[in-house]
Amino acid sequence: MTFVISGLSVSSGVAIGKALKISSAALEVQHHFIQEENVETELKKLADAFTIAKKELHDLKVSLPNDAPEEMEAFLDVHQLILDDVDLQQNTKELIRIRHLNAAWALTTVLDELLQQFDVIEDPYLKERGADFRQVIERVLVALQGVNLASDHVLTPIDRMTSEVIIVAQDIAPHDMLRFKDLNFCGFVTDLGGKNSHTAIVARSLDIPAAVGVRHASELIMQDDWLIVDGDRGMVIVAPPARVLEEYVHRQKEQRLAKNKLQLLKHTPTKTLDGKKISLMANIEMPEDAAAALTEGATGIGLFRSEFLFMNRPNDIPGEEEQYLAYARTVQAMQGLPVNIRTIDIGADKSLDNDLKVITANISPLGLRGIRWSLSEPEIFLEQLRAILRASAHGPARILIPMLAQVFEIEQTFQFINQAKNDLDARGIAYDPGIQIGAMIELPAAVFILPVFIQYFDFLSIGTNDLIQYTLGIDRADNSVAHLYDPMHPGVLSMIYKVITDAKRANMPVSVCGEMAGEPKLTRLLLAMGLEDFSMHTSQLLTVKRELLKSDVSKLEEELQTILSTFEPLAQAQLIENLTQL
């Protein structure tokens, strides 16, 4: 049966493929598709893990003391029976054979289906038996980690242009999106999420069509349903009829041709029609993203989100040496172009998966985020600062500090930077003594004490994502208020204009590294405000560059004051739209 469900568009384009539902349990394990020739190897890993789990239960039962409660032996017998369940193993094997999921992914998918069945049981006793299945399968997963050696993995080569897999999930955290970077899929759909949540931001970095906030999608869509994801409209068409499918296949081909044409702009100097030189930099999450940024013509890394180095690390966090190697690799990959490394910004929807998870899992957007968290963890902060300083010996690495609002935070930050320099001096380790230090402007308070920032820092970077949410009082990861998140709100635009104007008046370099910088519909508005440094995801560079090449700043400036003094949303939106015609 054909039906349409709608949500929010977070990444444009068209994806056509079969639904691959990712369970909530499956999000906690590594995912990869296996090749046909490796199916038997993966099946053996699964069998070995079950054997290990059975032996553990047997050994536990044998070692029970004589005075152990009878219930304990019965409990172990129940778990042994679950391990011997033929359907449990058979269903998992089918997912490995037919869908080519790795063993851990297949097993957690089966677990999630079982738990859904237990959820609808009314009898309280039987309902609780679902917990037994969870405990048993978790035991097998632990055993599987011991036999699932990374050297055995042979991943299916990524080809998103020809993939026919669309991920469907209730929600996907940012660190899970990083796991999916190496997964061969062409689009994704989630029940939850906001247009400017960090998950949506990472999705845009993958440059694939996506829709979030599609309520009940994971319940309504069945495994292997044919889907069309219209990323431009945030719409999902389930079981599309032939006529609709044909239309979208045509649209998909047109969009691919347009993307191919954009490649011709890679080596074109970024200048407006009236000769203004514009800098286009890239936002990245991991060192390996730098090569793609350079290939697409980025003039540097405007934002390295260093917190992603700390995610998906269940047992530890990266120390100074590991961080240094990652930052140095990024700096070297950019071949002399600047690299702005933002110190760790956890909290809100970016918690860690290691020993610090207890501290970071439930931090609200108004909590211990950004520099507040770093100052509360001095040893971790010093390790990171030393790592960045060491990387500066290989090229123009720069330190970028997030979430500053107080003068004492600024002063403490510079004390830590000086301490890190002293530590390296004492160890005789090289770094750039004149390394540039920048500040993120993402809190309204920072906007109104900008002279202090200009006094202390070498450059500024406007984080529009957080500036918008804090100005409007909206959690951008909360789907229930996502419709209120408005980059064109008059209050937001006035703040951005004030920062750009005041910084330029003081000869202070200023850039925009939030999502507004990568939105082609807002490119000319930012140009009119005087912005000359844009930073965005690599996938957006050429689209924005095309807009810049067609723009005449002198004409745009003439319309700016009318836009800034218009407070009626529809009228203002029309004025901004008119800029695209100039």
Image (tube, grey):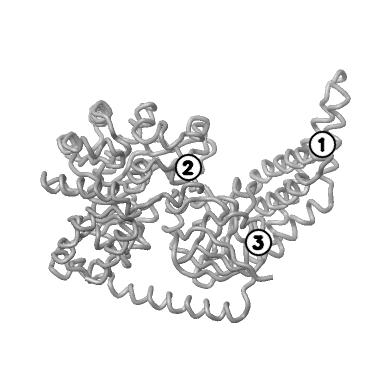
Q: Position of residue 581 (x, y in %)?
A: 25, 72
Image position of 319 with respect to 303: above or below = above
Front residue (pair 296, 203): 203
Residue 197 left/right relative to 423: right
- Crowd around label 2: few <14 · some 14–19 · many ≥20 (10 Å): many
- The mark closer to the camera, 3 or 2, is 3
Q: Identify the residue shown where x is 28% and y is 42%.
A: 440
Q: Please tell me which residue is depicted at 31% across the width and 42% down the height of the picture.
A: 442
Residue flagged by tag 2: what amino acid is it? Asp
- Secondary structure under tag 3 reads loop
**Could you tell me residue 459's position as x and y percent?**
20, 44
Q: Is residue 175 visible?
A: no
Q: Is residue 44 left or right of residue 430?
A: right
Q: Can residue 7 be seen at all in this image of the molecule?
A: yes
Mark positioned earlier in the residue sequence (2 or 1): 1
> Residue 124: which numbered mark, if any?
1
